[in-house]
Amino acid sequence: MRTYLFISIWLYSGLLYSQTLIGNNGFLFEVTDTGINTKFSEIGSSFFRNKLILVSSKKIGGLAKIDPNTNEAYKELYCLDTLAGGLLGEPLLFSRILNTPDSEDQLSFSPDEKTVYYTRSAKENSIEFKLYKAILEENSHGNWINEELLDINQKNISIETPYVNSLGNKLYFSANFPDSIGGYDIYVSNINADGSLSTPKNLGPTINTDKDEKYPSLSIDNDYLFFASKGHQNIGGSDIFISKIFNTRYSVPKNLGNTINTQYDEIAYFHATDNTGYFSSNRKENIGFDIYYFTLDHIKQTIEGQIVDIETKTIQPSTIVVLKDKNQIEIDRLITGEDGTYSFDVIPMESYTISIEKNNFQDASFPFLANKSTETTYKKDLEITATKPIIAEVNDELRIIVENIHFDTAKHNIREESHIPLNKIIKVLKEHPKIKLAINAHTDNTGTRASNLNLSNKRAKSTLKYLIKNGIAKNRLLSKGYGENRPLIDCKNNCSDDDLQANRRVDFVILNTLPENTLNTDNQTGNYHIIAGSFSIKKNCIKMIEQLKKEGFASAREIGANKNGLYLAAYASYKSKPEALKALKTIRIINNEKAWLTFKKLD
């Protein structure tokens, strides 16, 4: 007796733990009785002409013959009016043609309600169902004709719980075909133009388990699959699950939670509207399945925050922010405004990725789990890293290339968002203390030449002051304004807004070097080589070369090993020693003080 009591307590505590573990999963169901349940089983199936079709073992007007496999009467199809608040009207036999002395079960109709797919088992083997199709006679009041046993049926195979999608081109069902993963798996067939079915396709191991999956149905928009399963993460018995449908796959199923599922069996879930519908459950002990009405509310959750630069902490407008689900499928996207904020609606207990794209910043991704089951707003500021500046050859000058410096119209005060590119300049100057820099400011051609020249001088000086304030020696800097005299786009009096924006700029020119064909030029001929580093492992040499190419040294390459067996990574190669020495001087200023020149004949 003690052993029995202990086992009973252990089993019950396990069920409670399972319910607690799963929780509501972000779904709030209100479940109510439909008012028609009896001691017999009532299982909802579909809608036909605004009436609910019910499968039940109750009998009207006579004594029932008992099915030895279920200990209930053989099942029949009934139709019921749907009343306010989810209540159902008095059940009436649905069809004198489809109902037979055998046992009828689930059915589903084409969108135009002119074709029905239904299941029936013979009394001799009442647990093996076959799939049929019938056509509604034109202008009749329910005269089903051309009953047909479909070709996908097989001997000793039970096909059950059919469901036609709202487009009328797919039929989902459960069956114990030889290729099933468990006892019963969910399959789908295409519905051909003549109503016949294509070869069934198993929905695969994401949906099907080594246990039973039955009662497929779809959301009104066909985006989600619902089904009953004894597998997956389960509270007990058969639970109802949801899975997102993609073009070629399904998302990992999610339990609809403990506001609808219990330690008993929940089956035959289907929607009447986006947030209402019916399901059946045997949650009342010693009684078969009862049909219930549900109303569904999703728990509202939001994630929000600002996009900021990781170094300056300045907010970042005009940033593309993308929300992706756990399968990396895009859900939503936005572009931040002047306040740099983003906000997305999310579903409780789901995993997401927030991806960020912005010019002159590295792409970034941030994982996020909505780990609360109550209504909440998650706060998450996202920090992004600016791309590194490059030194490039432009119009016979070496320049430090960063995004443009922005000023308000007719103003010379540096805007906060321009601190990021200026900080990049500061970083380059601190890493390479021999660089001397000219700050050249330009305007567009709106206004007078004199006012534009004056404004550009003020902007150049504002930029210079910012660099000095942040630790750059004044003797390394020169500022000058050119007004409208050096337009990037010479559009004269026919300038577009984009032309004007392009002409409003600040250039950063390295004064104490010349290009000397060190950058943006393919220099790989000659036996004089400027070396960036030597490596005992070749793959480390290759990594160095890849990095040099990213920094603009197009000629970077591996020139083989020296006499000590070290692999050499070269910036460039030159035919004459004087040419190579000039380039070496430039490289030591702009990139690497320890670069050296070597002579090595190449094959």
Image (cartoon, rainbow, N blue to C red):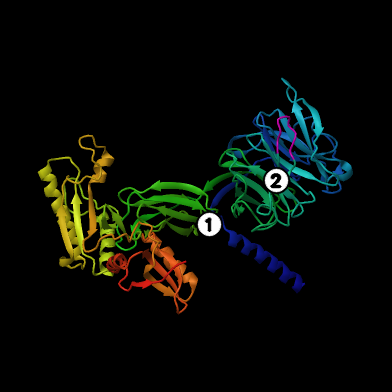
Percent coordinates x, y for residue 364 in the rendering: 42, 57
Q: Nearer the viewer, residue 588 or 174?
A: 588
Q: Residue at x 64, y 46 (%)?
A: 226
Marks 1,2: beta carbons within 8 A: no
Give the vertical position of 365 relative to 98 (above or below): below
Please provide the residue range marked out in magenta. Answer: 190-198
Percent coordinates x, y for residue 358 in the rendering: 37, 52
- Distance, label 1 to label 2, CA atoms, is 25 Å
Q: Nearer the viewer, residue 241 or 175?
A: 175
Say whether residue 408 is left or right of residue 401. Answer: left
Percent coordinates x, y for residue 449 in the rendering: 12, 42
Give the vertical position of 17 relative to 326 (above or below): below
- Which element carries disc 1, helix, strand or loop? loop
Which image quarter: residue 129? top right
Q: Residues within 10 Å of mark 2 (few under 14, many from 20)?
A: many
In the rendered image, residue 163 lying in the magenta stretch gets the answer: no
Q: Which residue is mark 2?
A: 215
Q: Residues within 10 Å of mark 1 (few under 14, many from 20)?
A: some
Q: Residue at x 72, y 67 (%)?
A: 8
Question: Is residue 17 visible from the viewing direction of this image?
Answer: yes
